[in-house]
Image (cartoon, rainbow, N blue to C red):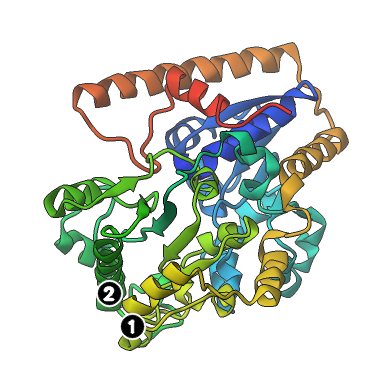
Amino acid sequence: MNVYFHIDELARDAVVASALKKELRKIGGKLTYGTRITTDRYLAKYNHFDVVILPSLRHFEVACQDPEVLPENVFILQTEAIGQATGTLRRLNGKYFGDDLEESRPWHSAVARYLLWGYSHLNPFKEFIPEYLEKCTVVGHPRLADACLKPPNKVHKPVSRKVLGLVSRFTFLSPMDNRIPFESVISSMRFGKRVFPLFENSPDRDVEDLAYTEIIDFRIMLQIIMTLEKENYDLRVRPHPRENREGWETIARKLNLKITLSPWDEPFGHWLQELDYIVTPPSTSLYDVFFQKKKPIVIDHIVSSRAEHTLTESDDRNQILEAVCRPKSVEEVVDRLEKDDIPVKEDIAIKNLQEQVGFDIAHQSIGNIVEAMQEFVKNRPGAKTSNVDFWKLLNYRFRASAFLHLRWIKNRILRRTEQGSGFHLSFLRKRWIDRLTRED
């Protein structure tokens, strides 16, 4: 079995690709790493794989634009799949069915399998296209799998200090593509009849609300850092994959902050394993936090006016927030950390984990994904790879590798920084991905 896996954001998705590759190897299968470049440039012409795994229907539409000639081996496995936890279905629907159900019908009709994180993700299929239920398999959140975590003997913590992780989500203030503030406003605002899906259920909100909440969160996080760096804490900041990490490097240098930035390509789960406490704005990373039995503090209630600017379908509405400690002041945050007094409503947390990430099966999700692929290939007519297919695959790998390495050389000459999805899938990076996860 030959499988193509699209790595959308390196720090987020590479660990899953690595674990899948090792799991496939056990049954004699092979996995090819892909990126936005290889998916968009080569997939339509050189799709000679048994299974292609993409993170959303939009990626399928961009890669294969002719609705009359669509492959029948595409699996959708989301890389962000907590949209329904806001209490609405639109965000989740967009990843599975596109922004317009009818316009995207050729593509979602052609999807071979939908691999779902949690049991509640079956709801949009039941409500909108029940005939697709036979194409759905709940596999659990792949990044929560045992295979995607560090072995306990490789988790290192300082003995004398508590380790506090701060989750950064400032993609508007400090975007990875180095946009100036004017460009951030232009790319995010409402304008005339053009309404981004983000605003659809928030008719009284616009780009200034996005900026308002991010500025508040950044200011509060800075206050916490500047207060706690005088105490006996090891402060570690985790920039968002679509955030420019160099922004934190500049701030730390100018303010002489004693913080450690997470390596930009480190898997979130690996970073999380070495923490004692987590402070964060509202974020879907809370599912990873609770799954690892950590106790988070969320800062969204510190400024009461913040609630007046949140969007209906943003992470600020995520239902798992009902389980979280949400202090009313920076002083309360510091006091709770000092006293190790961070309450959690475990029943609410577990309920949401079960619905959204398949709490009971997530630890074996990598194996569940491989089983779903095996079943598909086994039952697909003419699925056995021929010698012709071998040479076609070799042709794809040669073309993709040559292009990616030429691009890598060009960007090294121009000294362009790798960030988020803008990483280079060179030979060295492939070896790095291979080593992210352990062999059983």
On screen, residue 197 above or below 248: below
Along the viewing direction, whichever of 56 and 119 lies nearer the viewer: 119
**Quarter holding residue 356:** bottom right
Residue 352 placed where, x, y %? Answer: 67, 71
Q: Residue furthest right?
A: 379
Residue 333 placed where, x, y %? Answer: 39, 74
User: Which is more N-terminal, label 1 or label 2?
Assistant: 2
Q: Residues within 10 Å of mark 2 (few under 14, many from 20)?
A: some
Give the residue drawn at x 49%, y 52%. Answer: 275
Along the viewing direction, whichever of 254 and 216 lies nearer the viewer: 254
Q: Quadrant of the N terminus?
A: top right
* Residue type pointed to by label 2: Ile
Q: Residue furthest left?
A: 254
Along the viewing direction, whichever of 311 and 128 lies nearer the viewer: 311
Residue 137 placed where, x, y %? Answer: 78, 54
Give the residue drawn at x 26%, y 66%. Answer: 227
Callouts 2 and 1 close, C-beta under 8 Å = yes
* Residue identifier under label 2: 216
**Quarter holding residue 32:** top right
* Residue identifier under label 1: 306
3D distance between C-alphas at marks 2 and 1: 8 Å
On screen, residue 188 above or below 39: below
* Residue type pointed to by label 1: Arg
Give the residue drawn at x 45%, y 73%. Answer: 336
Along the viewing direction, whichever of 435 and 373 lies nearer the viewer: 435
Q: Is residue 286 left or right of residue 1?
A: left
